Amino acid sequence: MLFFYTNVYGLPAADAATMFLIVRLIDAINDPIVGTFIDKHTTRFGKYRGYLLYMGIPLAIMAILCFHVPNFSQMGKLIYAYVTYVGLSVIYTTV
């Protein structure tokens, strides 16, 4: 991911590294919340299978958006990278 964001996407390495740190901090808060929610709820397909089925398509869409390089300014690209990478990380937590 770092290679993509710096060499293909065009973000400075410091911005990409800061983004990775912030996303991991968000994950540290999000993962226990989602894990607790999944443990306490059962879908009609079973304890966990429903989340795999329902969240697979949003995960694929977010992964495609994450690797899309928009024609924005540098700040626009940074905001787009944050939104898509945080979204990918949050949806990946459920899968």
Image (spheres, rainbow, N blue to C red):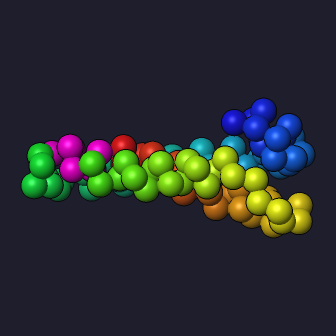
Looking at the picture, how far across and down is residue 31, in whole percent?
A: 42, 47
The vertical placement of 87 against 56, above or below, is below
In the rendered image, the quadrant that contains the N terminus is top right
Q: Which of 15 and 2 is in front in this view?
A: 2
Query: Residue reaching furthest top?
Result: 3
- Number of numbered discs visible in the structure rendering: 0
Q: Residue at image x 64%, y 61%?
A: 83
Q: Residue at image x 82%, y 41%?
A: 8
Q: Residue at image x 53%, y 54%?
A: 62
Q: Is residue 81 magenta?
A: no
65 horizontally vs 12: left or right = left
45 horizontally vs 6: left or right = left
Looking at the picture, how far across and down is residue 67, in whole percent?
A: 67, 47
Give, as a single range, the part of the protein colored magenta.
47-52
Dominant secondary structure, magenta: helix
Q: Nearer the viewer, residue 1 or 37?
A: 1
Place residue 72 in its image quadrant.
Answer: bottom right
Looking at the picture, how far across and down is residue 87, in whole percent?
A: 54, 57
Looking at the picture, how far across and down is residue 55, in whole percent?
A: 35, 52
In the rendered image, the quadrant that contains the C terminus is top left
Q: Residue at image x 37%, y 48%?
A: 56
